Image (cartoon, rainbow, N blue to C red):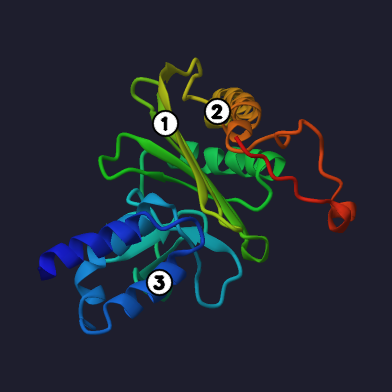
Amino acid sequence: MPSNNAAAISAFIEGAPPGELADVIADIKNLTANEPKLLASVTPAFQKYNEEQLLTVKLPGSSQPVLISRYNSLGDSRYYDVESQKSFAFDHQTQKASDVQSYSHDSEYSALISSLLKSLSTHSIEHYPSATYTVCPTSSADTIALLLVSNKYSPSNFWNGRYRSTYLFTPSSSTLSGNINVDVHYYEDGNVRLTTTKKIPEMKVEASLASSSSAAAEIMRKIAVVEKAYQEELNRGFGRLSEGEFKGLRRQLPVTRQKVEWEKIGGYRVRLFSL
């Protein structure tokens, strides 16, 4: 039974909506008050959630957030940030960073990574002003990861949202692939959640790596085209939902086919019909 509880709690954690993990944890604590050690036993679920959701955290003494992902992991709950040249310990349950140290990750593609950081910064400012991003070599060292996450939380209006994009560029073959994820939760007088995943198939990037700046510019051009097309696809999908599924959830007019004048509701008389 305890293992079943741990599996259920792990599923709750991994499925937490954007910006609402603390609320999920509070509910879990209330539901498992008789098993206080249960949360500590599901640390892998916290790590999976934080890495997959590209969680952002501010390092002690810094106002600039950095990303948590499997691509910039050093193991043993330590991560690094290329731009700030720092490594740090991270507590996956409290989502707090500590033990910040200087760190430099050597890579044969250091020049390209630096150029990609600059290009991704420009792209982020133009399209995702509140986003956090990073570029780093993967554990295999022959692929470069470009990561971006943009969070927008409005709990006072009962909604939260997150946009994530992950791209992998392989210099040896000049190919780019990736995924785009959108997750929006609306919970005023109901519970509606939109989760979408767009897989970006591998594509060729026609650019010479001899010039890291021009190669980075071409990679970002490809990404911009992909993201614009997906945004347009989402907009069309929202239009279909509004005119289709959502409209079907409620009656547009009462059976009289006339709109109710609510300011005169006190003067209406109920008519009874008998068969």
Q: Secondary structure at mark 3?
A: strand
* Rendered position, 87 above or below 38: above
Instruction: Give the labeled residue for mark 2.
Output: 223
Query: Which is in the foreground here, disc 2 or disc 3?
Result: 2
Which residue type carries mark 1? Gly
Quadrant position of residue 90: bottom left
Residue 30 or residue 56, whichever sits in front? 30
Image height check: is 2 above or below 51? below
Q: Nearer the viewer, mark 3 or mark 1?
A: 1
- Tag 3 and tag 1, C-beta contact below 8 Å: no
Which residue is painted at 34% across and 24% down in the image?
Answer: 172
| Neighbour tally class for label 3: few under 14, some 14-19, many 20 plus, Cα within 10 Å | few
Of the numbered discs in the image, which one, if any, rests on residue 101? 3
Give the image location of residue 189, x and y in percent.
59, 58
Dot 1 corresponds to which residue?
178
The residues bearing labels 2 and 1 have C-alpha atoms spaced at a distance of 9 Å
Q: Secondary structure at mark 2?
A: helix
Report the side of 114 relative to 72 (left or right): right
Q: Are marks 2 and 1 in contact (CB under 8 Å)?
A: yes
Left or right of residue 174, residue 257 in this image: right
**Helix, strand or loop for disc 1:** strand
Q: Is 262 on the left or on the right of 232, as rendered?
A: right
Q: Residue 228 bears which disc, if any?
A: none
